[in-house]
Image (spheres, rainbow, N blue to C red):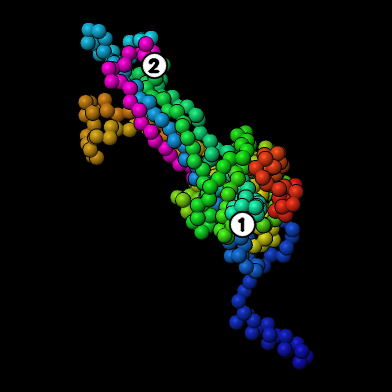
Amino acid sequence: MQNLYRLIAIALLCFGGCAAQYVLAPDGEYDYRVPIGRGDARAGFETLFASTVKVVWTPQYTNIFYTHDMRNDRGLLLHLPLRDENSPTGYRLLRNGIRETVDSYSKVGTALVISRQSVANQYNVAVALTNAHLVTAPDTIRYFMRDARGMETKVLERISIKTSTSLHVVNRDGERISAKIVRLDPEADLSLLKLNIPHLMKKPWPFLLRLGKTSDLQWGNFVYIAGHPKNKMHLTAGTVSLDEDKDRFFVDAPIRAGYSGGPVVAVRDGLPNFELVGLCRGATTETFRLLVPHHRLNEGATLSPDLLGHISVEEREVVEPGLGIIVSIEAVKRFLLDSRDSLRENGVDIKTDAALRMWGF
């Protein structure tokens, strides 16, 4: 009886003073909803971030603009210029109707470092995985004149020719690292990069967490995605939707530009038990056509019949929130294993590297 009283007293004490905890028993499956933290979850995220780098790819283009003569020999205004076989566009130009400029833009995304090896010189060689669309762009882009209905004509107004590119990554400490493309697979939207890292630079580390299985994912599993929207490291998360195509799945997460190429990790039986299940490919987009006034029109101006002639129709692509596309870990592994020859040619020892053995080498 005395032991019974003691048990009742302990129960009452805990009811009044012990903090309640919601704990799920391990079941060996990937978690649903927000995973429960056990141990140092922060350290798990820092390990993930240490092997994640920002990718910056910058193509440079030479632009040639053509200004056509829109009047005939009698000075009457035409809808389209007259034909001229001696013109580079095939249509009559003004006397000083050719102008050249040079410009560039940058694509920013994310890559996952999967190997880092010491070499004889002052650099380490590292290998990183990212998306192919982050490091590619058309060699030549042509823009054509539109008629009064907004339909594209055959009259060339501008041609942009890619003349050079530059590629680098930025580690967690903000240090810049030179990079080059080793292999591309546009269909799978995957790319392999080689990084030259100074010996004394601590980060990035190779990816040290476990590889998961996309085939183990179920509807509603919870995943995290690391990326660099707005040029800063960010973390987003969402629930999984499966697809008939086993090389991809979808995530209901707010994915924006900068998350492409970012690692996607699922949690098996609570944080920080991360497993890599894929790479973020990006989000779906929707195209809209908008009426856009001329930039010289003042804000709040009344659109009179005369001002209507200054309105144009523009086509814009808008990211659909909450529908992220993920390349499965199985597709990533196949791409990497098919890159054996490219890695050897770039001085990567695929036989002795412990990190690469994890990927099946």
The verdict on residue 90 being magenta is: yes
Q: Is residue 55 above or below residue 27?
A: above
Mark 2 neighbour density, 10 Å: few (under 14) some (14–19) many (20 or more): few
- The numbered mark at residue 123 is none
Q: Residue at x 39, y 29 (%)?
A: 63
| Dot 1: element | loop
The N terminus - image quarter: bottom right
Residue 69 image offset from top left, x and y in percent: 29, 16
Residue labelled with disc 2 = 88
Q: Residue at x 60, y 76 (%)?
A: 19
The amino acid sitting under disc 2 is Pro
| Quarter location, residue 20 | bottom right
The verdict on residue 64 being magenta is: no
203 relative position to 329: left or right: left
Q: Nearer the viewer, residue 291 or 65?
A: 65
Residue labelled with disc 1 = 205
Q: Is residue 147 above or below residue 340?
A: above
As drawn, the residue found furthest toward the front would be 121
Helix, strand or loop for the magenta stretch, by majority: strand
The Cα–Cα distance between marks 1 and 2, rounded to whole angstroms, is: 52 Å
Residue 24 image offset from top left, x and y in percent: 69, 65
The amino acid sitting under disc 1 is Trp
Q: Nearer the viewer, residue 51 or 269?
A: 51
Tally of numbered discs:
2
As drawn, the residue found furthest toward the bottom would be 2
* Mark nearer the N terminus (1 vs 2): 2
Q: Is residue 144 above or below residue 318?
A: above
Q: Residue at x 73, y 63 (%)?
A: 26
Residue 321 can be seen, yes or no: no
Residue 61 image offset from top left, x and y in percent: 43, 32
Stretch of the chain drawn in magenta: 86-108
